[in-house]
Structures are given as C-alpha cells and as structure tokens.
Amino acid sequence: MELRQFDSTDYQIPVIGQGTWYIDAGDRALAIAALRRGIDLGMNHIDTAEMYGDAEKIVGEAIAGRRDEVFLVSKVLPENASHAGTIQACERSLAGLDTDWLDCYLLHWRGSYPLEETFEAFEELKDAGKILSWGVSNFDAPDLEEAWELAGEGGLVCNQVLYHLQERAIEHAVLPWCEEHGVAVVGYAPFGHGSFPGPDTPGGRVLQEIAAAHNVTPRQVALRFLVRRPSLFTIPKASRPDHTAENAGAGELRLTEAELARIDRAFPLGPRPHTLPVL
Ligand code: NAP
C-alpha cells in the first residue's frame, strides 16, 4: 500500500483508506471482518463520524487490540459544534470507539456556530491529547480561506470532500487551494455512493479497457485516478472483506499519463458549480 504524508503532520497514511457510513446497515460481523481485512492490507486510515449511527461502535470492535495500527478519524456534527458541544461530542465518539484519542477530528460541514468556537474546542482537545490533529469537511475555497485565517500555525490539516469520477468539482478551486496551503484532501464517496459507472456506459468501457491492460478491476482504476496527485487520499466504504481486498489492491497500481488522460476525457470535469457539491 502506498503511504503519503498527511499534510504537515508527522503521519504517513495510506492513499486508500476505509469509510464507514452505513457500515451498520448490514451484517455486523461481516462489517467488522471487512474493516479488519482492510487494516491487514494496509488501509489503516479509518473514517467515521458521530452521524453514522452504530458505525463508531463497529469500528471500535474492529480495531480492538490494534488501536496503534490505525489512523482514526471522526467528525462532529455542525449542530453540536459549539465550544462545549464539540468537547462533549468528542468524548462520546471516544467512548463509542473505545479509544483514548482520535488521530484527526473534523467539523462535518459548516453550520451556524462560529468557526472560532469549534476550532478553540479542537485546540483544547489537542492540548488534552484527545485528538492529535483536526480539520474540516465539505469546505469550499472561501470557507477554507476563512478557516485558515482562524486556525493559526499547525491548525487545519485536511478537508474531506466529495470526489469521484462523475463529480470532480473540487478540482476547480478546492484542490488548488489545498495544494497551495499544504492541506490534505480526503476524497469521499469514490464510487459515487453506490453509482459506479457500469460496463455498458462509455466511461465504464474506458475503465474496463484500462483495467484489463493491468489485470485489475475498473474500481481499482478509478481509485488510482482519484489519488493521482500527491495531495489526494480516498476512503471507499466496503462492508464485505472481498470488497475491501479489491479496494486495497489499488494501493499499488500505477497508471500511465496516457491512461490518466483517457480517464480525464471519459469523465470530464465540467463547469464550476455555484456551490460545492456534497452528499
Ligand atoms: P462509496 O465509498 O462511494 O460507495 C460505497 C458503496 O460501494 C457500497 O455500496 C459498497 O458496497 C460499494 N463497494 C465498495 N467497494 C466495492 C467493491 N470493491 N466492489 C463492489 N462494490 C463496492 O460511498 P460512501 O460510503 O458514501 O463514501 C465513502 C466514505 O466517505 C463514507 O463511508 C464515509 O466514511 C465518507 N463520507 C464522508 C462524507 C462527508 O460529508 N464528510 C459524506 C459521505 C461519505 P458494500 O458496502 O456492500 O461493500
């Protein structure tokens, strides 16, 4: 599995991690087995959130006895992101995950509480050793600019945003901004949250042809395209061990410039939307 520096932190984390939204919707034992298989295969960046129902508890079970191997991320909901609410939400997540610390803690999206309040709470949690770093999610470039001004030295380390082949809007402004400021970009929903291009679509056929040339799968090709720049990470969610194994297989794949250009043409960027697309 290819590792990359996570922004300005000391962490080296895998380019392909594991998401957990709706991981509590199916067979619990299978979901735990999937996460464990993912860790075994180097996908030790695990993303969860207080919003994801029982997911934090499932993650807690999956990482029991191997907490040190995992780069664990959770998120506070905007409606809880007051100063006191953020601290309480973090405590709840730590309890649910059965851990003493988070490697990174994110504001899930921007809400009505002033960013200063949330960020002050993040810094207090950091000073207390309950989180080791913090970041944001679903922030467009103007929000990032504001957050950056407030965050101060060593603050904001990542922005988690929607990024898949059919939704590349972050490439207009968010990705360039993050690259200029050294902020890691964690792309979520790399398979379009369940709407991956099928083999009978023009784009799907391009993925199939490139996959066949490397003896890999179209999903592995897609994941590799989504981490083609050094600032990028991705977090597919899989609740079956065979799916996690397939996703982990993208961690060593390399595509040629010509192949990347072909995918770029098959799934064009499109015009910049007025607001940043989110799920
Ligand atoms: P996704 O990863 O794009 O797609 C998940 C779907 O893909 C599931 O149905 C899963 O099926 C399927 N899948 C995964 N690997 C597969 C494989 N190798 N072969 C066939 N199917 C496969 O969607 P997502 O869960 O929305 O996004 C990923 C993660 O990003 C989330 O889980 C969450 O952690 C994070 N996220 C963050 C935000 C935010 O606002 N910050 C928003 C959305 C998502 P199975 O479950 O059956 O394996």
Image (cartoon, rainbow, N blue to C red):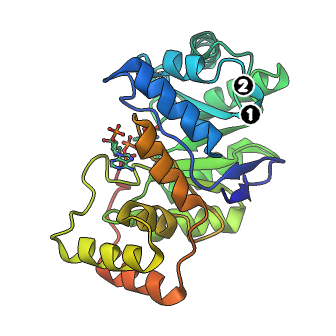
Residue 81 on image: x %, y %: 54, 23
Relative horizontal placement of residue 12, taking residue 252 as reference (left or right): right
Residue 69: mark in rendering: 1
Where 79 falls versus 272 (above or below)?
Answer: above
Residue 87 on image: x %, y %: 65, 16
Relative horizontal placement of residue 174, taking residue 119 as reference (left or right): left
Circles 1 and 2: CB atoms closer than 8 Å: yes
Q: Residues within 10 Å of mark 1 (few under 14, many from 20)?
A: some
Where 96 falls versus 234 (above or below)?
Answer: above
Residue 250 on image: x %, y %: 52, 61
Q: Judging from the image, what secondary structure is the residue with disc 2 in? A: loop
Q: Judging from the image, what secondary structure is the residue with disc 1 in? A: helix
Residue 113 vs residue 17, the one in the foreground = 17
Instruction: Examine the rendering and report whether any part of residue 113 can be seen.
Output: yes
> What residue lies at 59% left-to-right and 59% top-to-bottom?
251
What amino acid is at disc 1? Glu
> What residue lies at 60% left-to-right and 70% top-to-bottom?
229
